[in-house]
Image (cartoon, rainbow, N blue to C red):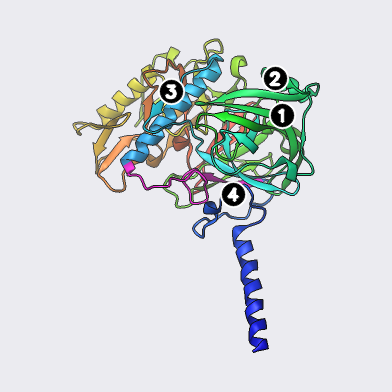
Amino acid sequence: MKGHNLALISFFFVLLHLLSLALGSPSRGLDRETTQTQCSFPEEKGSTLQVIHVTSPCSPMKPKTTMSWEESVIEMQVQDKARLMYLTSLVARKSVAPVAWGRQLMQSPTYLVRVNIGTPPQTFLMALDTSSDAAWLPCTGCLGCPGSSAFAPDKSSSFMVLACATPQCQEVVNPICFENVCTFNQTYGGSTIAANLSQDTIALAQDSVPGYVFGCISKATGTSVPLQGLLGLGRGPLSLLSQTQDLYKSTFSYCLPSFKSSNFSGQLRLGPVAQPKRIHFTPLLKNPRRSSLYYVNLIGIKVGRKTVHIPPAALAFDSTTGAGTVIDSGTVYTRLALPVYTAVRDEFRSRMGNATITTLGGFDTCYTVPITVPSMTFMFQELNMTLPQDNFLLHSASTSTACLAMAAAPDNVNSVLNVIASMQQQNHRVVFDIPNSRLGISREPCS
């Protein structure tokens, strides 16, 4: 009997050990529901992080209820409207009103990466945003922060808040000095955050970055704040690229997975090592009004073999007005200035012949399948990007509808921006080579 009890006790401890391995360590920031058996997070090696979609099984933002295909398309469209308003406000350096739909205001991130923060590390799935600079995340005691996961500064031996006189405080837009602590306010989509400028060790895959500066959020309003924080990949002084310049040489790339991928897992590759050698580049342009945004020179669009007639002014880069074309990871569907979209849509429709046109939400060019679809090519300076059909056509798995997956800027947004969005980038390696002011694109299945 005694031997039987010992066997039971041994089995119990083995079971506990296996359970701890399954849940992973550290795991403070990951909600328990994100660590179910259906969530598969591959081991991260070197300077390469896994990129997951917000609706993947591992995401704390995955939908709690199943939506129809039509509902999911419309919801992402509304998120895109808010995102475009946010990007437009960055260019204009002014606030804009958020877009409302249904129950909530939305300007949600699209992709997440796993980041360890503090000593010992606390793990978070932070939103990846190429159009933002500073990192920030909810901290213990935050008022109004969504979700239940917060960074606990008192449990990290390497954490410290930054004083008003520190050089990093001068890099924040409109810093506020409160009891000699550098604080700041920032808008993000339909939300406003108040944060203390802080620093701590962060770990990205197998790379450790001591003294990383970020915002420790103490108060938030609205519902646009990513549940477990944001990691900015822009070009500003507090961005990941600027703070890790010695380590990653201001170079990174990503491969975004297809929305159809079961686990939605792509890659974020940091640093010049292991970037593709055979790849075509287009120059990166800089807008002094908003130097963080990644502008490129879009010179034309082909539908089939025909180059669409687009007024040159609708594609031209203008640093004064903010006009031009940006590559953005946070927008789902490409948004084009009205003259550009109208020309592309009309040529696409003409190639479809007499097929009956229907609409879905903000998409005005939908058809009943089966249909024969022309190719589409974005023509950048020194680089052509021919899109696979899955990158510009939305197919319903449950209905017989297919829609052209791009649109004009919303009616209530006076946008001069053309935004090349994540759906059009999926299953491509996109390389941001900042030292050489260039952006590379090549086909790469990564779903």
Determine whether 444 is above or below 291 in the image.
below
Query: Dots 2 and 1: beta carbons under 8 Å?
Result: yes
Q: Nearer the viewer, residue 397 or 391?
A: 397
Query: Dots 3 and 1: beta carbons under 8 Å?
Result: no
Asked if the magenta segment contains residue 244, the reply would be no
Q: CA distance from mark 4 to mark 3?
A: 44 Å
Question: Circle 2 — which element?
Answer: loop
Marked residue nearer the N-terminal end (2 or 4):
4
Q: Position of residue 374 (x, y in %)?
A: 32, 35
Residue under the image location 37 percent in, 17 percent down: 339
Question: Circle 1 — which element?
Answer: strand
Q: Which mark is residue 175?
A: 2
Which residue is the site of mark 1?
Answer: 197
Task: Give the amino acid type for the residue marked by disc 2 in the picture.
Answer: Pro
Determine whether 295 is above or below 112 in the image.
above
Which residue is the site of mark 4?
Answer: 30
Q: CA distance from mark 2 to mark 4?
A: 31 Å
Q: Badge 4: few (under 14), some or many (20 or more) residues near its Cα, within 10 Å?
A: many
Mark nearer the viewer, 4 or 3: 4
